[in-house]
Image: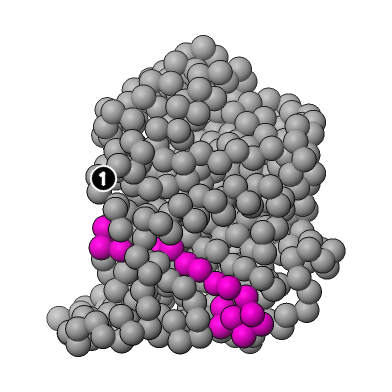
Amino acid sequence: MLIALGVVLALLAALLYVNLGTGERRVTEEIPHLYPVDDPQFFRAMGMLLGPGIVQGNRVDALHNGDAIFPAMLEAIRGARQTVLFETFIYWSGEIGDEFADALSERARAGVKVHVLMDWLGCLKVDDELVDQMKDAGVEVHRFHPLRWYNLGRINNRTHRKLLIVDGRIGFTGGVGIAPPWTGHAQDEDHWRDSHFRVEGPVVAQMQGVMLSNWSKATGRILHGPDYFPTLREVGSQPAQMFHSSPSGGSESMQLMYLIAITAAVKTIDMSSAYFVPDEMARIALVAALKRGVRVRVITPGKHTDQKSVRRASRALWGDLLKAGVEIYEYRHTMYHCKMMMVDGMMSSVGSTNFDPRSFHLNDEANLNVYDRGFTARLTEVFEADIQRSKRITLEMWQDRPRLEKIRERATALLSPML
């Protein structure tokens, strides 16, 4: 009996180890500030050292909250002529889920090749009947890392990406899931504040490539050809790149992208993060930026949050940041699910990535980096409006929180690599 128990415990320990580890060496030394974000060397680092090349001629439009986001996505799907590819972490049953299923099914029946990749864990709340409806119409639906014996070593690796690409020409990415909390206009605690982005131009091909990499992992099939990768002409003036990371390859690249952008800042860093749990290297980089005279502002959820343990772990880590001068704001009116970073009024990074260990090391993530002052200025205006609906947390307020609260937060912070 004891031997069997020991074997079970050893297996559980092994599964925990492989699910929390990436097998890659993590950044352990501070990255020196060598150049600002408007220096050509910064673009070389972002486009050659870390990610795909920065491509010219794009147009990126910001959409805020479900009332603006979902109609734009559904319009694009209903207008599809060749292909629809859709990868999502969250898809739940409900009215908005029905709308998407109907639109995807209708296009599949019309002969459009429709491919849907759902994260197994994030989509547990979708009814089998809804999935069967799409499959019966001809939609290819697959789950990412479903609970199977052969997936036990990857069960903690989720696809957190939110990608929709239509005809290889129109792309969407951001923070929204297909579920009731994302509907509406953030009018109450049942309707979340979030942003999503509609993209046209050459960078859409990079978005397609990111989606298809996970499609091939889930299905063993490669999708290619002109229906998926048409010739894309310049439609705007915004340089952009589609950044991505995965534990199966380049798990540290997303964190490195954030760290190099923070390290290049000389004026401002504005960050929206639904789950803000900065590790030691991230805190070092932010404090170093403050010492260079950079203003750093962070908006994160307040009491309205779907992950109370993450909020506790986050608050336990704020001491050094607040002492150094980081302005931290808690959104007051509803769950704040935005994921955006703007640096020096020049660079914006938007997409699925949270500023936490799970996004940096365990999830498959995707962020769109846009290098354009006009676009960044518009996002900064939205950020300022969100600050007006937030409460600033001062160092004194943080130090004066109840003793029991401090203990619970410190204990939870020990689990931050798993949150």
- Asked whether residue 100 is drawn in magenta, I would say no
Give the residue number, with chain letter if any, for mark 1. Answer: 188
Q: How does the figure colour the protein chain or chains?
A: one colour
Q: Which residues are magenta?
A: 286-305
Does residue 184 appear left or right of residue 244 in this picture?
left
In the rendered image, which quarter contains the C terminus?
Answer: bottom left
- Seen from the viewer's position, the closer of residues 165 and 193 is 193
Residue 26 in the image: state x and y as whole percent: 58, 79
Residue 67 visible within the image: yes
Residue at (59% x, 67% y) in the render: 269
Relative to 405, 149 lies left or right: right
Image position of 168 (left or right of 136): right
Choose between 243 and 190: the one closer to the eye.
190
Q: Quadrant of residue 254?
A: bottom right
Q: What is the x, y in percent for residue 171?
A: 60, 36
Q: Quadrant of residue 204?
A: top right
Q: Nearer the viewer, residue 20 or 165?
A: 165
Q: Nearer the viewer, residue 74 or 60?
A: 60
Indicate the amino acid at tag 1: Asp
